[in-house]
Every structure is written in structure tokens, then in C-alpha cells.
Image: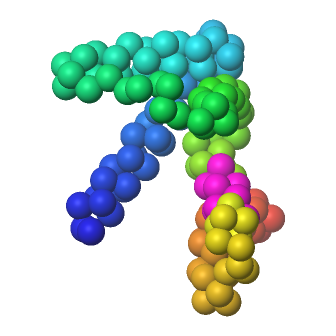
Amino acid sequence: MLFFVFLALANGVLIGTSRTINGQLGTRAGAFRASVWNHVVGFVFLSVVLLVLRIWPDVTDVPVAAYAGGVFGALFVAVNSYVFPRLGAMSASVLVISGQVLSAVVIDCVQQGTFPAPVRLAGVALVLLGLTLPRITARLRREDI
């Protein structure tokens, strides 16, 4: 279990780094061009990895609706490439993570057919509060000046 926790944290570092790089590319080339380059390079990289590992996916074994994830991923990269340089890494990350947490609650509700337990909702509220604290404290500091 600890390995998966470490892996998730490392993935978060990669996501933050990727967003920053794509944001810089987005200011030079535009958000959608940055997204295209991100996905072209990612496709080539993953294709090489799959070829080296000799594991090629069977694309006929996937429901058509599953390909919507690619559309959402491409849009995610394009939007991040646009907003990151304008909002800054911290503000954009806080807003993106807040959206992810809220949508995760809704997705779990729909998939499980039940409302989350009060303890889980309290956890979500604490996460969202923790994510917004930097913005609140920054605003309070600006008002003190």
C-alpha cells in the first residue's frame, strides 16, 4: 500500500511539473498547440514503451465511450496550458484539485448509488478548506497592506 501512496505522490509531482511546462509552452504556441504537442510527444513515448515491453493494447476490447477520456484529457491539457500562466501555478492547481475532489464525490455517488458518509463529506470539506487556505491568507495579507 505504501508503494501506491508514493506512486500517487510522485504522479502529483509529475502533473504539477507538466502543467508548468505546458503553461509556458501555451504562452508561446497557444493552448491548443501546446495540448497537441503534449499528446503527440506522449503518444510517441508510450508507443516506444509498449514496443519495448512488447505489450500492445487491443483497442477493440474497449467500449467506445471509454475513448471520451482522451477527449477530456486533451481538453484538460489545453485548458491548463491557458490558465496556468494567467492564474499562477498555485491558484490554478488549487482550483483544478477542488474541481477534481468535487467531481469525485459526484462520480462515487452515481457509481455506488449512495450518498457519502458524513465522515467522508467532512474529509472532503477539510481538503477543500485546506486547498483554499492559501488564497484566503493571501487575500487577508493584501487587505492588511
The quadrant where residue 138 appears: bottom right
- What residue range appears in magenta? 96-106
Q: Was residue 104 drawn as part of the magenta stretch in this picture?
A: yes
Q: Is residue 90 visible?
A: yes
The one nearer the camera, 111 or 142, is: 111
The one nearer the camera, 102 or 55, is: 55
The quadrant where residue 74 appears: top right
The reply, left or right, for residue 59 in relation to residue 64 is left
Please report the residue visible at 70 percent of the width from the left and 40 percent of the height from the top.
87
Q: Was residue 66 drawn as part of the magenta stretch in this picture?
A: no
Q: Quadrant of the N terminus?
A: bottom left
Q: Position of residue 13 (x, y in %)?
A: 39, 46
Which residue is most to the front?
Answer: 61
Looking at the image, is 3 positioned above or below residue 89?
Answer: below
Q: Position of residue 59 (x, y in %)?
A: 47, 25
Magenta stretch mostly in which secondary structure?
A: helix
The one nearer the camera, 27 or 40, is: 40
Which residue is most to the bottom?
Answer: 118
Please report the residue visible at 43 percent of the width from the left and 18 percent of the height from the top.
43
Q: Position of residue 122 (x, y in %)?
A: 65, 85
Q: Is residue 81 visible?
A: no
Looking at the image, is 73 positioned above or below residue 28?
Answer: below
The one nearer the camera, 102 or 141, is: 102
Please report the residue visible at 72 percent of the width from the left and 65 percent of the height from the top.
110
Figure coloring: rainbow
Q: Quadrant of the C terminus?
A: bottom right
